[in-house]
Amino acid sequence: MRRESWAPYAFLAPFLLLFAAFTVVPSLATFWLAWWDWDPLGGQEWAGAANFVRMAADPRFWTATVNTLVIAAVATTAQVCIGLFLAHTVHRATTHASAALSVSLLVPYVTSGAAVAILVSQLVDKHYGLLTRALTALGWGEVDVLAQPAGAWTVVAGVVVWRWFGFTTLLMLATLASAPRDVFRAAELDGAGSWAQFRFLTLPLLGPVIAFSFITSVVGALQLFAEPLLTDPSGLTCGPTRQCQTLALLVYEIGFRDFQFGYAAAVSATVFVLAAGLVGASFAFFRRIGWTA
């Protein structure tokens, strides 16, 4: 009996060891390093709260925070809304059409995110991009979509939505597939149209999935790195005004370009606290409206 009681922990041991080595320990080290002035090419001195004071006065941090939060809000909202619409539409389609559409939703998910970001960067290039040339032909003049924050936010958020909307839709479809179709047929016979079925049947059924998708999307958006880096050819700064630089890119810039590991750790610790706060607020909101499992 004792061996059987320890069996689950033995099976979980490889994952727990790797998780501790590559997630728990580095996270704790980051919080510890945030209180030091740590230069890998120089010395290490205790800095106390100096890194956090510097961060509060650093305009780069606030610009990256605004960029990250706006991109997260736009991408998460669009992703959940598109997933809801497609899941409801595919669920009401015929069986064969539903299967074909479900398989097609996997295409964006299995496509390389780096490849998509590079392709989008070519489409919106201010000199030879296809979208830029189309706008010029329509009389808009020379348009630089990535030069303005709103355009850069939209492009990066669009890349994120393209990558993940299919996965979100499939999660919602799996939930709807577990519900008896007779319920929807009975509602249709009673005169409930598409909107009524969506409001009173689909939406309540998908409440927990919407909450899960929203929270995971927010956490993922706070870690955006490859999409803004590859979309804008300016590199880590994402343009002269840092119009699409995210917090993850800022951490990389401070740590691996400027070699200020202590300051980069302070920014990373702040991002962790920000993510925890947003997740906690989201849980409280969805629990209040009854959308948590």
Image (cartoon, rainbow, N blue to C red):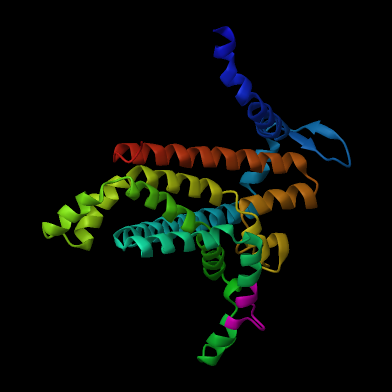
In the rendered image, which quarter contains the N terminus? top right
Nearer-the-camera pick, 16 or 244? 16
**Taking 87 as reference, is 31 left or right?**
right
114 w.r.t. 292: above or below: below
Residue 66 shows up from this direction: yes
Q: Looking at the picture, how far across and down is residue 188, in whole percent?
A: 16, 58
**Taking 288 as reference, is 245 left or right?**
right
Q: Going 37% across and 61% down the picture, which residue do you hit?
A: 98
Q: Going 83% across and 40% down the picture, which residue do you hit?
A: 39
Nearer-the-camera pick, 93 or 209? 93
175 w.r.t. 233: above or below: above
Nearer-the-camera pick, 18 or 36? 18
48 w.r.t. 224: above or below: above
Number of marks present in the image shown: 0
Residue 128 covered by magenta stretch = yes
Residue 125 covered by magenta stretch = yes
Which residue of the protein is positioned furthest toward the top in this rendering?
A: 1
Residue 85 shows up from this direction: no
In the rendered image, which quarter contains the C terminus? top left
Magenta-drawn stretch, dominant element (helix, strand or loop): loop
Nearer-the-camera pick, 66 or 203? 203
Q: Looking at the picture, how far across and down is residue 199, in whole percent?
A: 23, 54
Which residue of the protein is positioned furthest toward the front in this rendering?
A: 96
Q: Going 29% across and 38% down the picture, which residue do you hit?
A: 290
Q: Looking at the picture, how far across and down is residue 123, in whole percent?
A: 61, 77
Q: Which residues are magenta?
A: 121-130
Q: Looking at the picture, how far across and down is residue 65, in whole percent?
A: 57, 52
